[in-house]
Amino acid sequence: MKIRTRFAPSPTGYLHIGGARTALFNWLYAKKHQGDYMLRIEDTDKQRSKDEFTQDILESLAWLGIQSDIEPIYQSKRSARYSAVIQQLLDEDKAYYCYCSKERLDTLREEQLKNKQKPRYDGTCRNLKAPPDSAIQPVVRLKNPEQGSVTIRDEIRGEVTVQNTELDDLILARSNGSATYHLTVVVDDIDLNITHIIRGDDHLNNTFRQHNIFLALNKKAPIYAHIPLIHGTDGKRLSKRHGAVSVNEYRKQGFLPDGLLNYLVRLGWSHGDQEIFTVKEMKELFSLDAIQQSPATFDIDKLLWVNQQHIKNISGNEIRATLEKYFDDFGIQTDGQPSLEDLYDALKDRSKTLHELCESSEFIFKDVTEYEPKSAKKFFTPESTEILEILKKKLTATNEWLAENIHTQIKLTADELNLKMGKVAPPLRLAVTGGANSPSIDLTLELLGKEKTLSRIEQAIEYIVATG
């Protein structure tokens, strides 16, 4: 049996962390077993489905590298197939038309809740011999078994059983003839030969209902694995208030796709104490039996840490194209000095995201037009003029513009003035960056280049004299 999995999002919103993790688990399981993974867009809800959401899902999954092995399936293009299956069930007396009005169903529900009963359809139309004299356009309901039980062998939860008396005759087709969610997913899973359904455990109740549709169609249900949901650090279901945003937003913030994938795979799955995984390792090691039964906890600080490890483990040459696009999107026009590869390699150890790396190197490519007021008041004193003058002289004479040589000249300046490095570096850093924070001062100057460094030191001296 060839393993076939699927990810089936509804394009009613942007792809978020929970959906991306579900897609990842399905993809990894298929790849681990040399099977197929496929994407199905469940876009039958015409009012809520939007093309922009579909595009976001496609682009986000492509960025993550989770590619479908076949062309994505769109449910909106399969209505004829669903109608044929509904008619088949009607012809086989496994489904029936229901003419109950909304008012009757609302009243029934109220009475059941009042009597502390589980709300469910009472089967009024189940055995009608002929259509009633009614103008109501009927829905189509499944003839759910009235006896027995449904047992699901879940790969994560084990055996779960529900009595058929707890399930009602669910609607397969709306009054306008369109198929409902439960019918469409079963038909699609049958037609695509899906062997394993890996999805959130909020779908567990749906599974029992869908299992009986498989039985009505004389088909064996796939193997199920219901993964626990993701919670915030407060123990509540994950939402935007926990810092969780769309996958595309993480991309804009400068997370690497492999970093985000690594973090997602660890949300509920583990392999010993290992924290950092390559995609290749994920494919080799992933298994359903290593998924925990309790909810995973989303932690933005842990995500940043994982992403930083991946930033450290990749070279500037490997990520050049991404860097070019990111700097361009950030509004920074690079001039080739330094190269983006060298810049990345120099700053990657202190950057948690590409956004952070980009922001911390902005001073290299943009002129310093102002200085942080608080830092200027503290470091741009009359005494700092002499420091900068001597630094300018020594740095001008430096031939090989390397961090180690720059460090030597800064140290010589401190010795000449009988000052500690902590007194020399701050005014220099402020002069060349406009602020008080940057990588080590010698590396900062190497990245900035000799010409820009000397020009900015001269500009700072003029500023101190003019404002002193």
Image (cartoon, rainbow, N blue to C red):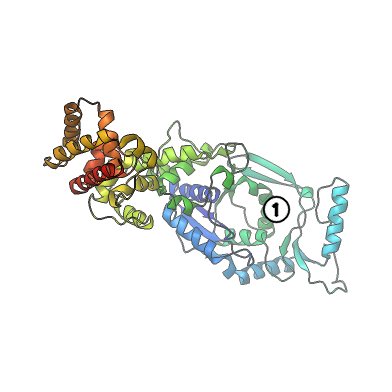
Count of residue discs: 1
User: Foreground residue, 151 or 42?
Assistant: 42
Crowding at mark 1 (Cα within 10 Å: few <14, some 14-19, many 20+): many
Q: Position of residue 332 (x, y in %)?
A: 33, 55
Question: Quadrant of the rendered structure where residue 201 is?
Answer: top right
Q: Position of residue 182 (x, y in %)?
A: 67, 58
Residue 292 visible: yes
Q: Say left or right for 218 vs 116.
A: left
Q: Which residue is at 25% across, 26% downward?
A: 420
User: Foreground residue, 40 or 148?
Assistant: 40
**Relative height, residue 336 to residue 417 (above, below):** below
Q: Position of residue 162 (x, y in %)?
A: 73, 45
User: Foreground residue, 403 or 370?
Assistant: 370
Residue position for label 1: 209
Residue type marked 1: Arg
Task: Tell me the element at label 1.
Answer: helix
Q: Quadrant of the C terminus?
A: top left
Residue 440 visible: no
Q: Which residue is at 61% across, 36% downward?
A: 234
Q: Which residue is at 56% across, 57% downward?
A: 9
Q: Say left or right for 383 vs 256.
A: left
User: Foreground residue, 194 or 206?
Assistant: 206
Q: Position of residue 320 (x, y in %)?
A: 29, 52
